[in-house]
Image (spheres, rainbow, N blue to C red):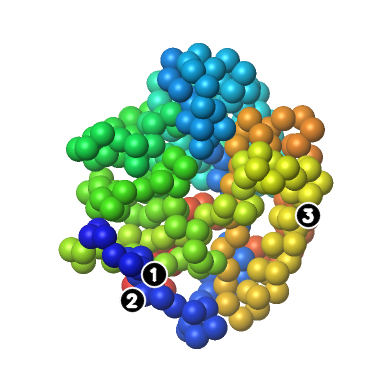
Amino acid sequence: MKPRSYGPFDWSPIARRPKFAWPNGKRVALWLIPNIEFFALDEQIPAAAGGGGKAPDVPNWAVRDYGNRIGVFRMMEVMDRYNVRGTVALNSDLCRFHPEIIEECMARKWELMGHNESNTRRLNDAKPGEEAGIVHRTVEAITKASGVKPKGWLGSGLQETWDTLDHLADAGLEYVADWVNDDQPVVMTLDDGRKLMSIPYSYELNDKPAFEKKNRTAEEFDTMIRRQFDVLYRESETQARVMAIALHPYITGVPHRIGALDSALEYICKHDDVWLATGAEIAAAGREVLCK
């Protein structure tokens, strides 16, 4: 994508859009995104990710390792209770270091989307000419480990360069979740006419900024999720909506916070017309409506 003042899509005020509906008349598409990440002990954890100290940064590394050893399985137990499949934002190095997590995800029919190779390396920090290799190696590693080629991408830190979307399309990916600017899918048109779907992720209903930057309590995070759902559910009487909940096993997967996820999912899943979807399902439904 060439540098530009506005994104690779038309500006579209939701008050003037044609009616949008999900399959089978569902109103709100709920997708949960567990960010299952790998931080290398011998690399510096980026300051933007909560690190910044010299390697080995034992305290910051260890709490993240807790998420992969224990927290993710605690989250799986809760999500299983409500038949919610995760769409994993997956660092592909995890396939090499923790293949058991991949096995558990696939047993639950969770979706895996690319999330860089490691969370200690972001696309906008890559050396010139290296970004395409990161994208392709990530896709190849996840495909080999899971037997399923990823369809979606979430960049580590949601970071991109001007070339990222082209690299994603080159790798055969169909959607991206970095652009948190809508409550519905959006068609992105690249300079050469190729199209990617942008589907709504969330920086608000995201446990990392909620707990680490805004100092929310577990009870407040539960309330945030419920209030977001109530508004989107009401608005979806006329326009279908997407509701994303972004989670990190080392944050939500600790004992004193896991109850917030359990409580919020119990509340949401009691409502009719909620579509428990994956990112790929949302992207496909959006493409069917918007690309006719």
Viewer-side label of 3, 1: 3
Residue 187, placed above or below residue 63: below
Mark 1 and mark 2: Cα distance apart in space: 6 Å
Q: Amino acid at mark 3?
A: Thr
User: Is 81 in front, or is 283?
Assistant: 283
> Which structural element holds mark 2?
loop
Q: Is residue 174 left or right of residue 281?
A: left
Q: Residue at x 57, y 72 (%)?
A: 240
Mark 3 and mark 1: Cα distance apart in space: 34 Å
Viewer-side label of 3, 2: 3
> Which structural element holds mark 1?
helix
Q: Is residue 160 visible?
A: yes
> Which structural element holds mark 3?
helix
Q: Is residue 129 left or right of residue 221?
A: left
Mark 3 and mark 2: Cα distance apart in space: 38 Å
Mark 3 lies on residue:
223
CB of mark 1 within 8 Å of CB of mark 2?
A: yes
User: Is 32 in front, or is 210?
Assistant: 210
- Pick whichever of labels 3 and 1 is earlier in the sequence: 3
Q: Residues within 10 Å of mark 3 (few under 14, many from 20)?
A: some
Q: What mark, if any, has residue 288 been given in the picture?
A: 1
Q: What mark, if any, has residue 292 been given in the picture?
A: 2
Provide residue 93's location: percent of width, then percent of height: 40, 26
Q: Residue at x 51, y 45 (%)?
A: 87
Q: Amino acid at mark 2?
A: Lys
Q: Amino acid at mark 1?
A: Glu
